[in-house]
Amino acid sequence: MAPDGTVYYSTATAAGDDFWFVSASGGNPVRLLHASDGPTRNSQLSHNGQRIVYLARLANVDPQIQRTFVADLSAASVSLLIEEDPLLGIHVGPIWTPDSSSVTLGRVPAAGHVGAAITVNLEDRSLREIGSPASGYDVPLLWSPDAAYIAVQTFRDTGSSIGIVAPDGRHLELGTSISIDVIGWLSD
């Protein structure tokens, strides 16, 4: 739900996925834009209610390769977040930074690489790596309100763990149980 009480949602049809909105107080749904010719995943509204980030396949590319897209709600337009991905990995788990200026996403790396999460600034599309795990790859879960720390799930050949990435890039593991779930952050 956007800050103004608008509810955004997606629908899937044979022609692909569309984004819609409707006032939480009622009214007729309005089709906002066509998001993808195929299925979308991990859609998330920005904290300021101006954009939606989501995963979708690129046309005419391996169906397993997911890329991150950003829908600008006021312009009713869609753009690919990263034109060229240096690791050519599958994108996973895109989330907004607390100020809605950037998107953080994980990348399942090509063989022999480690998959650090990256943050992409929407204004200039610059990339910043968020502390690399010792092995495997990170899927971002939730930023702290001040964007100093980020909760991640790290996947390895031997399983997965939940942890926090500190400002200096260190990974602080919380546990390896699959029953651990990051619920939220308290701010001072």
Image: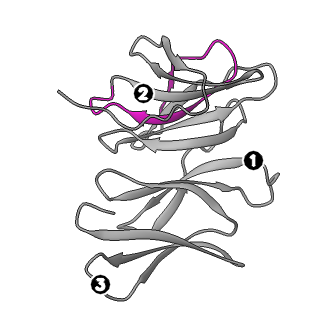
The question of residue 33 being in magenta is answered with no
Question: Considering the image in quadrants, where does the C terminus appear?
Answer: top left
Q: Do the residues bearing badges 2 and 3 touch, measured as CB atoms within 8 Å?
A: no
The residue labelled by disc 1 is: 65
Badge 2 amino acid:
Ile
The residue labelled by disc 2 is: 150
Which of the two residues, 24 or 109, is positioned nearer the viewer here? 24
Instruction: Please name the residue shown 70% across and 56% down the image.
Output: 57
Q: Is residue 29 left or right of residue 85?
A: left
Badge 1 amino acid:
Ile
Q: Please tell me how crowded label 3 is: few (under 14), some (14-19), or many (20+) other residues with Cα within 10 Å.
A: few
Which residue of the protein is positioned furthest toward the bottom in this rendering?
28
Q: Earlier in the sequence, mark 2 or mark 3?
A: 3
* Residue 105 rendering spot, x and y as whole percentages: 54, 37
Q: Nearer the viewer, mark 2 or mark 1?
A: 2
Q: Which residues are magenta?
A: 126-147
Instruction: Please name the residue shown 29% across and 75% down the image.
Output: 24
- Give residue 122's quadrant in the image: top left
Q: Earlier in the sequence, mark 1 or mark 3?
A: 3
The residue labelled by disc 3 is: 26
* Residue 60 rendering spot, x and y as whole percentages: 80, 59
Whole-number angstrom distance, CA of label 1 to CA of label 3: 38 Å
- Give residue 92's quadrant in the image: top right
Instruction: Please name the residue shown 37% across and 38% down the image.
Output: 97
Q: Is residue 48 above or below residue 150?
A: below
